[in-house]
Image (cartoon, grey):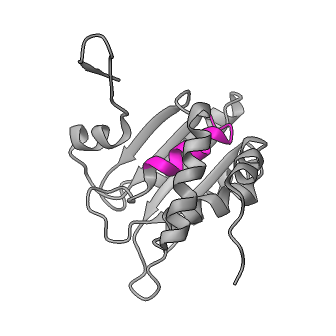
Amino acid sequence: MRALPDPAQLAEAIRSGDRAVLARAITLVESTKPDHQALARQLVQILLPETGRAIRIGITGVPGAGKSTTIDTFGSNLTAAGHRVAVLAVDPSSSRTGGSILGDKTRMARLVNDDHAYVRPSPSSGTLGGVAAKTRETMLLCEAAGFDVILVECGRRLPLPNTARRFTSWRRSPSSGRRRC
């Protein structure tokens, strides 16, 4: 049995832009194993101060609407303008393996081959609402890795207020007791 990696070392590698470590960290975040979940929570806590500065854009629509093609063009324009773009494509899950089918990645040929872009399909795993259960944590990891634009592709129409709440961090102002973003 392999020992789990040190979260501080993972965090440092992510900060330095190591894509292989970023991919492994996202896999840890998506894992349902309790030891992986504990490590993922530690990692996100370490990296939290590096997050919150990226532009986050959700793209949704019915199947076949052209979301992946639009993202490929839009993302390529963003990287040409000097941005680092992460695409989190929430894919339908395979009924056999539970993993992502990877269809969206094949329709983003330019971004997949762009050094300033990172495309990560994530299985929906039956999660309702169009986003994967750990999309928020995955966005945080990508932000810590230096991506300044995060595009989240969802496969169905979403009630926007509910989706926005999932991606918004609320905090209480100590003096007023009111919540603010």
Classify 102 as above or below 151: below
Q: Position of residue 42 (x, y in %)?
A: 57, 51
Could you tell me which residue is drawn at 48 percent across and 57 percent down? 89
Q: Is residue 160 left or right of residue 107?
A: left
Nearest the viewer among 52 and 2 is 2
Could you tell me which residue is drawn at 25 percent across and 11 percent down? 176
- The quarter of the rendered structure image containing the N terminus is bottom right
Q: Main secondary structure of the magenta part?
A: helix
Q: Which residues are magenta?
A: 136-148
Q: Quadrant of residue 77?
A: top right
Nearest the viewer among 169 and 119 is 169
Q: Is residue 139 left or right of residue 109?
A: left
Q: Is residue 97 left or right of residue 23?
A: left
Magenta span includes 49: no
Magenta span includes 138: yes
Q: Position of residue 34 (x, y in %)?
A: 48, 70
